[in-house]
Every structure is written in structure tokens, then in C-alpha cells.
Amino acid sequence: MTAKKKQVDIPIKPDVEQWVYQEAAPKKRPEKLKRLTIDIPAELHRKIKLKAVQEGETIAQQLRRLLEEHYR
């Protein structure tokens, strides 16, 4: 019986220029978020929640997208 040799993938490191430019690239700060609280009818909330679940999103994601589209 022959022993199997293990293979280990070693990632290739970037060359000096790639490394310098990668480090020099400005980092984006995450956008500051603010909380918005509104009262809506229970039936509207149910419809929004159902649509969000069907589309695999949260209510916050759905409403954020709608507001961004409206207030471009």
C-alpha cells in the first residue's frame, strides 16, 4: 500500500507594486445609518412582511430600497 502525499495550496503573494497600491487605496467608511420609526396599519405591515419573506429580504431591506428609488 502506498501512502498518499498531501497537497497544500499556497497562495501567491502580490508583487511589491500590487501590494503598495492595494495598501494605498482609500478605504470606504460605512455609511452612517439613522433609525426611522413610523406607525402603519397592521394589514399593511402584514402585506409588506409577506412580500419581504417571499423575496428573501427583510422589511428593512425592502423599504430601504423603495425609499432610495423614490429619493434618488
Image (spheres, grey):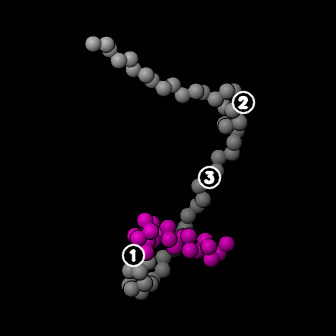
Judged left or right of residue 7, residue 22 is: right
Mark 2 nearby-residue class (10 Å; few <14, some 14–19, many ≥20):
few
Indicate the amino acid at tag 2. Glu
Indicate the amino acid at tag 1. Leu
Judged left or right of residue 46, residue 1 is: left
**Could you tell me which residue is drawn at 35 percent across and 18 percent down?**
4
Residue that sits furthest to the left in the current view: 1
The quadrant holding residue 54 is bottom left
The quadrant holding residue 21 is top right
Query: Magenta span covers which residues?
Result: 51-72
Point out the tag, 1 or 3, that comes first from the N-terminus.
Answer: 3
Q: Which label belongs to residue 50?
A: 1
**Considering the image in quadrants, where does the N terminus appear?**
top left
**Considering the image in quadrants, where does the C terminus appear?**
bottom right
Whether residue 16 is situated above or below residue 40 in the rendered picture: above
> Disc 1 on helix, strand or loop?
helix
| Residue closest to the eye, 35 or 46 | 46
Name the residue beneath numbered marker 2. Answer: 17
> Disc 3 on helix, strand or loop?
loop
**Could you tell me which residue is drawn at 31 percent across and 13 percent down?**
2
> Disc 2 on helix, strand or loop?
helix
Tell me residue 12's x, y (percent).
58, 27
**Could you tell me which residue is drawn at 64 percent across and 50 percent down?**
28
The quadrant holding residue 14 is top right
* Label pair 3/2, CB-CB below 8 angstroms: no
Q: CA distance from mark 1 to mark 3?
A: 33 Å
